Amino acid sequence: EFEIIEAREEEESGRLTGQLLVAGGTEQTRRVMEGYGRQLGLRTRALGSGEEAIEHILEDLSLTEGECVVLFDEVEDGLSGAEFARLLRSAVPGRSVSCLLAHGARRENTPRLWARSGIDAWIPKPLGRHRLATGIRQARLSAETAAPEQPRPAVQFDPRRPPQYRVLLVDDNIVNLKVATLILRQLDCEVTVARNGREAVDAAREADFDFVLMDCQMPILSGFDAAKEIRMLANPERRAVPIIALTANATTEDRRHCLACGMNDYLSKPVQKDALSRVITTWTHTNRDAMTEHDQHTTSEDEGLVLDMETIQSLRDLSGDDEPSLFEELVQIFLEDTPIRMADLEKAFEGADPDSLSGAAHALKSSAANLGALRLAEMFKKLEAAGREKQLESVESLIQNVRSEYQRVQEALEEEIR
C-alpha cells in the first residue's frame, strides 16, 4: 500500500543525498524546485516538460544513476501523472528510480491509479522545501519496499513462430496506443511505437517496416507531413512501405488528403480488430496501388445506451489472461484524463481560440470512442467541427450537453469496473 503524503511543513533534520530530476509544470515552478533541491543537498537538474524529460532520460540513462528521484508536476503539463509514470517505468524498468508526483486537485480514485502506474509517493501543491523533502524521503522508502517487478517482454510471441509483420504505430494518445498495440500483437505483429510524426520519420529512417499505422493530427509533426517525409526517404528501387491513416474524420475530403500525402489507405477510429485485420491482409498480400475504404461501425445501434457494449466487451476480450486489469486501467486513464482535457476545451472557448478548441475536441472524441462512449464522441466531433470552421456560436450549448453526457458516461464506466 502506498502512503499519501499530506501537507507537512515541520522542520526536516539533515540534508539529503543523491539526485533530483524535475519535470513538468511551468518553467518557473521547475526553477523553484531546482533551487529547493540544491538547498536540500541534492544534485538537481530541471528537464523540461514531461515528454521532454522522458526524451532526456532515454537519450542518457546515466541521468538516473545513484539515488535518483524524479519529481513530476502534472499541473499545466500535457501528460497526466499516471501517463508520465508509465513512460518513466518503460524508460527505466524496475524501481531503480523513484517517482514523486506533485498534484493539484484529485479525484477520489486517483491515488489507486497513481500507485498502480508506478508512482512511489505524491504531494499536494503548493510545494515548499520541507514538503518536498518529506515527499522525496517517502518516495525512496516506497521504492525500496516495493515488491521486485518481474520483467515481462513487451511483445509475447510463440518463440517457434516469429511475428509475421513489423509495424510502426504512430499516435499521440496513450489510450489509443495501448489498445492498438494489444490488437496488433494478437494479429501476430511486432510493434514499434512513436508518439508524434517526427518520431515516426526517425523510426522509418532507422528500420524497415511492413506497414505504418499513422494518426493524422499530432503535435510537432502531423501524420500528413510525416507521410510526405517518409515517402521522400523511401528507396526508389524498393516498394514504399504502406502507410495506413488512422482518422476520426472519414469524409471524402479527408480521404483525398490522405492519398495526396502519400498514404495508401485509412481506418476510422476507434480501431476495431476485424477492420485492422482486413487492412493488414489487403496491404501485405494484394495490390497496393489503390486506396480502399474500410469504414467501421461508429454509432451504437441503440441510441439510448450511454456505452456501446460491443466496444466494452471487445476491450474485455483484449485483456485475456495476460492483461487482466487492462479494461480497468483504460477506464481509470479516461476518467483521470478527460476532465483535464475538457477544462482545456472550455478554456479555449472562453479565450475565443477555435484552433485549440478543435484540437482538444479531437483528442477527446478519440478517447471517448475507444471506451464505447459513442454519443459523447459524437458531441466532441461537433465541437471539433465548430472549432475547425471557426463557428463558435453553438459551442456554449454543446459544452453544456457534453458536461451532462460525460457525467452519465463516468457513472456507467465506474459501474463497469466495480
Image: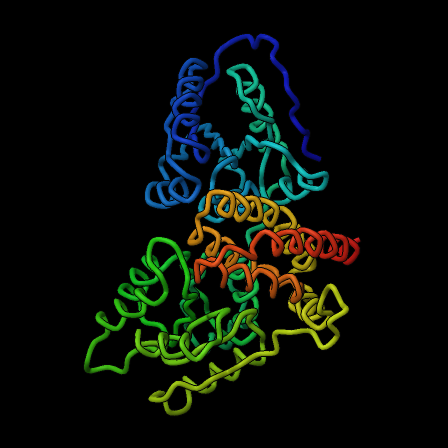
Q: Position of residue 357 (x, y in %)?
A: 48, 52
- Residue that extends furthest to the bottom in the rendered view of this protein: 287
- Residue that extends furthest to the left in the rendered view of this protein: 236
Q: Taking 397 as reference, is 162 above or below it?
A: below
Q: How many marks?
A: 0
Q: Taking 25 as reference, is 348 above or below it?
A: below
Q: Taking 401 as reference, is 340 above or below it?
A: above
Q: Quadrant of the N terminus?
A: top right
- Residue that extends furthest to the front in the rendered view of this protein: 393
At a point 30% along the width and 77% down the height, the residue shown is 260
Q: Nearer the viewer, residue 405 or 96?
A: 405
Image quadrant assignment for residue 148? top right
At a point 56% along the width and 10% down the height, the residue shown is 12
Q: Nearer the viewer, residue 122 or 224?
A: 224
Q: Along the horizontal axis of the image, is 249 left or right of 147?
A: left
- Residue 174 appears in the picture as rendered: no
Q: Position of residue 164 (x, y in %)?
A: 45, 78
Q: Position of residue 333 (x, y in %)?
A: 61, 50
Q: How is the image coloured?
A: rainbow
Q: Nearer the viewer, residue 395 or 265?
A: 395
Q: Along the horizontal axis of the image, is 347 left or right of 339?
A: left
Q: Position of residue 323 (x, y in %)?
A: 65, 60
Image quadrant assignment for residue 286? bottom left
Q: Nearer the viewer, residue 341 or 125?
A: 341
- Residue 91 appears in the picture as rendered: yes
Image quadrant assignment for residue 310? bottom right
Q: Taking 127 as reference, is 296 above or below it?
A: below
At a point 56% along the width and 66% down the height, the residue shown is 182
